[in-house]
């Protein structure tokens, strides 16, 4: 089966881009907006709607595969590519990429995906968002050409085993939306609330008291309305604020996380991005030191690295160093989904847990394809996406996994 044509259209991503530099510099929120000038390149507002390019591959037999190009909410941070502006890249997809892909065979995914992921335009690597969406379309096309699921293509080409059941999901909730958190509790989601704690004084408290009070409130709500046997993992994404509060004092951070763990008992606790260091090497050092201190103190807190863990090479470096309990494999940051596949398999091989994540700024299609990759590579859990509605993301990802497993099982019986 060959690619007969490439069609592209600019559309909406699932959420927004946010200028983290402006937020951390003291910009004040007005509802969801942040009035004031942005600081990061490409931004026209501190918070602005995310944009996407949908890449459609028309196959010889008329079937259409597609993938969506977009970036993460906090683009341009800690080694990431700058803000993805769809209007800057649409012409490339409609002309140069179309010429590169028309007539190419698509019976296999990996070789062409790796070619695109290594590709350049005008002497520069393709933006990670482009590599992400184009390779999604290639995986979808290979599955259509072979009349099987995308999970089966991944398992076949990478030598992995498909999961026997749907994977756990971390529900990414707005911390202010108490009804959404209630809905996730009632749906027995496996991990919650993720949330977003980006400013020390506003979100953490100058003594750390606000985050502890928030965590205690989540546990009280689980006890109040959850089933008696419901014990979700409590996951908090703190965007470097704990490191900002306590500086380089690993002992103080360890004590504080011990207090936070006590606040969520009897639940397991995962804390993401306790620090955003100025470099990858510094991030590995800080994470490794804290991980060792937490273990020595017997606190039982799992730490997850996100910033400075953007690429396949980054993930390998953290796994090799044993610096984190989990890596947040933020799919758009890795570019081609071939890198995402390899990242999960490498992390598992090295004994590091991983969240096959991404961003609320993704789309329904990228969420479905991530779920398919998850089934084939078996990460520790998925992050809910797209958006932050909770219900919609949970439905899209869980139903994608259930349908895929049912199809594979039915064909096995036949």
Image (spheres, helix red, strand yellow):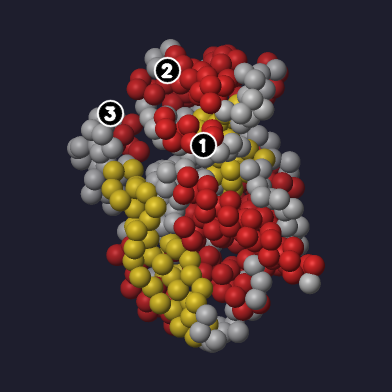
Residues 361 and 20: in front is: 361
The residue under the point 19% across, 37% down is 36
Reply above or below: 48 against 281.
below
Side (left or right) of 181 relative to 139: left
Q: Nearer the viewer, mark 1 or mark 3?
A: 1
Disc 1/disc 3 C-alpha distance (Å): 32 Å
Image coordinates of residue 45 in percent, x first then y, are 24, 45
Disc 1/disc 2 C-alpha distance (Å): 22 Å
Q: Earlier in the sequence, mark 1 or mark 3?
A: 3
Residues 280 and 213: in front is: 213
- Residue 26: which numbered mark, if any? 3
Residue annotated with mark 1:
184
Q: Earlier in the sequence, mark 2 or mark 3?
A: 3
The residue under the point 25% across, 38% down is 33
Image coordinates of residue 98 in percent, x first then y, are 43, 79
Side (left or right) of 176 relative to 398: left
Image coordinates of residue 214 in percent, x first then y, are 46, 21
Mark 3: few, some, or many residues within 10 Å (few <14, many ≥20)? few
Reply above or below: 90 against 193.
below
Image coordinates of residue 71 in percent, x first then y, are 42, 53
The answer to the question of whether label 1 and label 2 lie on touching residues, with beta carbons closer than 8 A, is no
Residues 176 and 256: in front is: 176
The residue under the point 52% across, 54% down is 396
Q: Earlier in the sequence, mark 1 or mark 2?
A: 1
In this orientation, does residue 246 appear?
A: no
Residue annotated with mark 2:
210
Side (left or right) of 325 relative to 133: right
In this orientation, does residue 103 appear?
A: yes
């Amino acid at each position: 089966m060959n690619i007969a044509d490439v069609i592209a259209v600019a559309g909406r991503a699932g959420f927004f881009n946010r200028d983290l530099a402006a937020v951390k510099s003291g910009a004040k929120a007005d509802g969801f907006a942040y009035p004031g000038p942005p600081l990061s390149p490409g931004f026209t507002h501190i918070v602005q709607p995310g944009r996407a390019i949908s890449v459609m591959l028309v196959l010889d037999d008329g079937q259409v595969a597609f993938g969506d190009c977009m970036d993460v909410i906090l683009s341009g941070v800690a080694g990431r590519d700058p803000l993805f502006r769809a209007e800057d890249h649409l012409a490339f997809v409609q002309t140069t990429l179309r010429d590169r892909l028309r007539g190419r065979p698509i019976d296999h995914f990996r070789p062409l995906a790796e070619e695109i992921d290594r590709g350049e335009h005008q002497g520069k690597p393709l933006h990670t968002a482009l590599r992400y969406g184009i390779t999604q379309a290639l995986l979808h096309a290979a599955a259509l050409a072979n009349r099987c699921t995308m999970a089966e293509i991944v398992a076949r080409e990478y030598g992995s085993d498909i999961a026997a059941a749907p994977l756990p999901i971390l529900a990414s909730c707005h911390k202010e939306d108490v009804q959404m958190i209630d809905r996730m509790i009632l749906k027995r989601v496996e991990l919650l609330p993720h949330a977003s704690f980006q400013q020390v004084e506003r979100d953490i408290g100058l003594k750390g008291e606000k985050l502890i009070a928030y965590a205690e409130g989540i546990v009280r709500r689980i006890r109040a309305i959850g089933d008696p046997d419901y014990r979700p993992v409590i996951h908090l994404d703190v965007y470097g604020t704990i490191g900002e509060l306590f500086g380089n004092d690993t002992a103080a951070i360890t004590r504080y996380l011990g207090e936070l763990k006590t606040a969520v008992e009897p639940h397991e606790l995962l804390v993401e991005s306790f620090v955003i260091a100025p470099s990858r090497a510094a991030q590995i050092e800080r994470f490794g030191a804290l991980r060792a201190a937490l273990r020595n103190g017997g606190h039982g807190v799992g730490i997850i690295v996100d910033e400075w863990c953007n690429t396949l090479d980054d993930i390998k470096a953290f796994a090799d160093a044993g610096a984190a309990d989990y890596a947040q494999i933020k799919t758009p940051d890795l570019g081609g989904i071939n890198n995402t596949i390899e990242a999960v398999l490498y992390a598992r091989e090295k004994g590091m847990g991983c969240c096959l994540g991404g961003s609320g700024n993704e789309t329904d299609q990228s969420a479905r394809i991530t779920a398919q990759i998850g089934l084939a590579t078996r990460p520790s859990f998925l992050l809910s996406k797209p958006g932050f509605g909770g219900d919609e993301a949970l439905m899209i990802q869980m139903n994608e996994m259930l349908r895929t497993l049912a199809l594979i099982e039915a064909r096995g019986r036949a």
